[in-house]
Structure formats: C-alpha cells, structure tokens
C-alpha cells in the first residue's frame, strides 16, 4: 500500500462516526480493493470464528489499520496492539478511540498474555521466542499467514502448530474458515462454502490452542460481504450424533428494517445437490422440480415457516424424491406465497442464465427464460416486472440497512437487474425438455 493511501485511510478513520468492527459507515466507504480490505465487515472474521478466552489479556503484533484490534478490544479484557508504522498506528488509535481496553504502541511491552495474534511478516524466531516466554500457562498464539513456511520457525520457538485452519479467500477478509477434515467428510458442502482455493492460514499454537477451535466444529463461514450489519450472519458446521448440521446465527441482534430481517436456523447436512445443480444436469426435469418446489412453498407456508422469503430453488436440495429446504435465514414480513414463488422463479432464471441454461426461444434473454419458467407453474409473464421491483427493494435494504438506501445504491442495483434481464442465454437443444414441458401443459392450463 502506498504512503498516500495509508494517510487517506487514516484520515477516513479519524473522521468516521462509527468505527465498530461491524461499522456500515466504514464497510461501504472503500473505493477500491485495497481500501475495502482494511474496512470490510469481515476483517475480523478469522478471529470471530475462534472461541477466544474470556477476560483475556491480548497481544497483537502488526495491527495494520486496526480491523483485528477493534474486534479484540470489543471482546477482550485488555489489548496491547503493536504497530511500528506511525501512520498506521494513528489509524489504530482512531479506530479504537472509544474503547478503554486498547493501548497502541510501536514496541513490545513486558507483560503476561493469554492470547497473541501475530501477522506473518513479524513471525521471526526472536519475536516468537519473546511471545512464548510471556504467554500464560494456558495461553494461545494465532499466526495469520498465506504460507506454511513459518511452521518451522514456530516449532523452533517452542510453538508447534496444534491446528491449521484454512481461510478462504484469505485471512485478511475470510468468508470461510475450516479445518482440512471437512474436505474429506463433506466435500460438497466444503466446496460450496469455500467458493474456491484457500489462500490464507490461521495457525493455532501454544498450550491453549485446542480450546480456540472445538473438536466437533468442521467450519465456520460468514455472510458479511454485500450486507449491512443488521443482516450479517455466521454459520457453524458441526458434527452431531447423526452426522453434521449447519447452525446459522446473526452476528448482532437487530430490529427488522421494513419487515426485512435475518434469524437463526439449523439444517441437517445432506449429501444432495441443489435444484439448480440438478437442472443443469437434467434439464428435462424442469417442470417436475418447479412444480414440486412451488408445492413445497405452499406447504411450508401452511406450517407457519417464518423464513419463507428464502425458500428459493437454490436453497432446496433434491434428496432422491424429497425436496429439502436449507439456509432459510431471511425474513420478509410483507411477502406471502405468491411473492415468494415469483421471487424464486426470477432468481432461478438468473442463476440458470449465469450457467448458460436454456431460454424459452433461440438466443432469448434472461427475461424470456424467467417468463417461460413462470408459465410452467401458472404465472403470467408479466410477473417479472413486479418480482424484479421487489427484489431491488429487498436488495437495497439488505445492502444498506435502510428502506431507501441512497439514490446511488438504488440506481446501481436497479441497473444490475436491468442488465441481467436483457442478457442473452443460449437455448438447450433437448427434446427431453420439450417433452417434459408438454407433459405438464394440461396441469399448467388448470392453474
């Protein structure tokens, strides 16, 4: 990062009214990738994923712009943050100015610590020796790095790695933190939550390392990227006596915004594909699966399921003959069955279009595909405009935390959907699809 950029970020932090670890003000202030990494809601996700010791005295070496420092200061008894660069040290002070738990300096202070966080550039033999000597008998050290090359230095300093966690896409802003065993035990889920290679590592060392990551936990992943703080969530993948389950919880308790909110949910893990995955492999099943999904929405509504808004096809597993809803965290108090069905068809068309799935006509648009899918379950093609308008409203609230957001945000989201609806999709040339549609024409006509 350039010196000019560092000064700009420090100035921004000095002027911010909300410098909390989940500050929307900071999260949406970054103009480029460099700024966003320093200000993102997810800057502290690696530490959020850990079970930090209660009432801990914490040492942080290499505080940067204070993203980890801020979170540590919110959850720990005391934090000593070391940052040698004066501009960055000033940024850390601005970011933690309302916390009495944090002190910032440019050098190490001889104290005893329960927990230490060390960034890779500082993980030298001398520094690690110093940390080990000042670690409490039950203390732990976390080294954040992009390479396993530091493990030898840790071992030489008497800090052997007790557990290695993979961070995707990296440790700076992790969306998923997982142990390697999930790749073998739950490969489908592991691929879904990691979204690609893990370019970061959290190395857990010291006598207290085992307590940082419970043995029954396989992974923790976060929805913090394009969401306002009220809608940010974490999901823990844990072993149970019957296999595994995913436990989702909001990061902060929040009131609904215009009826929109997120809530806790728990799902058993099934080794089954989503509706979208099945349709990509078996397009001839489109009418069957759409009808089954629509009936599932109606049944869940009759049961009084609160998170109906999230019951869209990519959140439905096809487990043999059973459709299983998962990941139902979003609530929309103003939406009933009709709105959920229309939303599900719109979003399904968008995901299928992304994958190059068939449109209703040769080289048709995503709008054509949405209309065609809707007709299969009895929707008039005009539903697309209303469903899109509702999706824009929902996205504005979810990404800004307010009903109206800003003019720029609303226009940007609306423009994204305008472009999505217009983009071309190449048609599958499958007689099986046509046969499947024909078989359902009578049923469609009755609805």
Image (spheres, grey):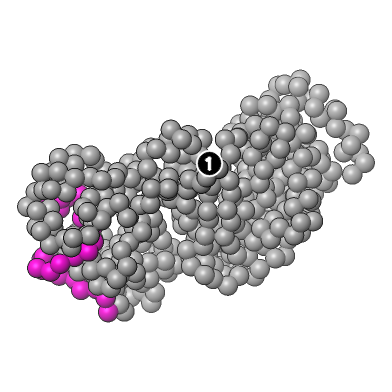
Q: Position of residue 424 (x, y in %)?
A: 64, 35
399 relative to 7 in the view: left or right: right
Count of marks placed on residues:
1
Q: Residue furthest left?
A: 126
Q: Residue furthest front?
A: 241
Is 80 within the magenta? no
Q: Quadrant of residue 414?
A: bottom right
Q: Residue at x 33, y 45 (%)?
A: 165
Q: Residue at x 44, y 42 (%)?
A: 194
The magenta stretch is: 100-124
417 relative to 439 in the view: left or right: left
Q: Secondary structure at mark 1?
A: strand
389 relative to 164 in the view: left or right: right
Q: Residue at x 38, y 48 (%)?
A: 215
Q: Position of residue 445 (x, y in %)?
A: 91, 39
* Residue 297 in the image: above or below residue 188: below
Is 109 within the magenta? yes
* Residue 437 in the image: above or below residue 406: above
Quarter of the figure that contains the N terminus: bottom left
Quarter of the figure that contains the C terminus: top right
Q: Nearer the viewer, residue 392 or 411?
A: 392
Residue tagged by mark 1? 243
Q: Residue at x 80, y 27 (%)?
A: 436
Instruction: Tell me, yes or no, if residue 12 can be seen here.
Output: no
* Residue 37 in the image: above or below residue 9: above
Instruction: Tell me, yes or no, if residue 218 can be seen here.
Output: yes
Q: Position of residue 330 (x, y in %)?
A: 61, 58
Q: Residues within 10 Å of mark 1 (few under 14, many from 20)?
A: few
Q: Nearer the viewer, residue 260 or 327?
A: 327
Q: Nearer the viewer, residue 311 or 442?
A: 311
Q: Position of residue 412 (x, y in %)?
A: 55, 57
């Amino acid at each position: 990062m350039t010196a000019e950029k560092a000064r700009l970020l420090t100035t921004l932090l000095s002027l911010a009214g909300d410098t909390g670890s989940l500050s929307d003000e900071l999260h949406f202030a970054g103009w480029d990738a460099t700024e966003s990494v320093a200000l993102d809601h997810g800057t502290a996700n690696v530490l959020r994923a850990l079970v930090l010791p209660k009432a801990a005295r914490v040492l942080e070496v290499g505080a940067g712009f204070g993203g980890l420092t801020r979170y540590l200061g919110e959850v720990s008894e005391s934090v000593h943050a070391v940052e040698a660069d004066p501009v960055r040290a000033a940024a850390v002070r601005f970011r933690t100015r309302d916390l009495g738990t944090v002190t910032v300096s440019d050098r190490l202070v001889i104290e005893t610590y329960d927990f230490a966080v060390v960034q890779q550039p500082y993980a030298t033999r001398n520094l690690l020796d110093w940390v080990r000597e000042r670690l409490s008998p039950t203390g732990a050290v976390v080294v954040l790095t992009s390479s396993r090359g530091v493990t030898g230095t840790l071992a030489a300093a008497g800090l052997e790695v007790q557990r290695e966690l993979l961070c995707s896409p990296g440790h700076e802003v992790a969306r998923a933190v997982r142990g390697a065993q999930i790749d073998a035990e739950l490969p489908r889920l592991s691929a879904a939550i990691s979204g690609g290679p893990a370019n970061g590592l959290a190395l857990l060392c010291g006598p207290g390392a085992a307590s940082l990551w419970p043995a029954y936990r396989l992974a923790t992943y976060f929805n913090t990227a394009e969401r306002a703080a009220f809608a940010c969530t974490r999901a823990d993948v844990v072993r149970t006596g019957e296999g595994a389950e995913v436990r989702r919880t909001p990061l902060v308790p929040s009131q609904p915004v215009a009826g929109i909110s997120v809530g806790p949910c728990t799902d058993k893990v099934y080794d089954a594909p989503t509706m979208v995955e099945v349709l990509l492999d078996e397009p001839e099943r489109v009418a069957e699966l759409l009808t089954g999904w629509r009936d599932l929405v109606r049944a869940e509504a009759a049961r009084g399921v609160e998170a109906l808004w999230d019951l869209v096809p990519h959140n439905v597993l096809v487990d043999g003959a059973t459709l299983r809803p998962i990941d139902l965290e979003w609530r929309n108090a103003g939406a009933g069955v009709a709105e959920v069905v229309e939303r599900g068809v719109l979003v399904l068309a968008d995901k299928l279009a992304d994958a190059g799935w068939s449109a209703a006509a040769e080289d048709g648009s995503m709008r054509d595909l949405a209309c065609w899918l809707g007709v299969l379950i009895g929707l008039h093609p005009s539903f697309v405009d209303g469903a899109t308008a509702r999706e824009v409203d929902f996205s504005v609230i979810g990404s800004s935390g307010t009903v109206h957001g800003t003019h720029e945000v609303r226009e940007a989201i609306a423009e994204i959907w305008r472009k999505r609806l217009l983009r071309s999709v190449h048609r599958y040339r499958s007689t099986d699809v046509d046969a499947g549609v024909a078989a359902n024409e009578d049923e469609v006509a009755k609805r």
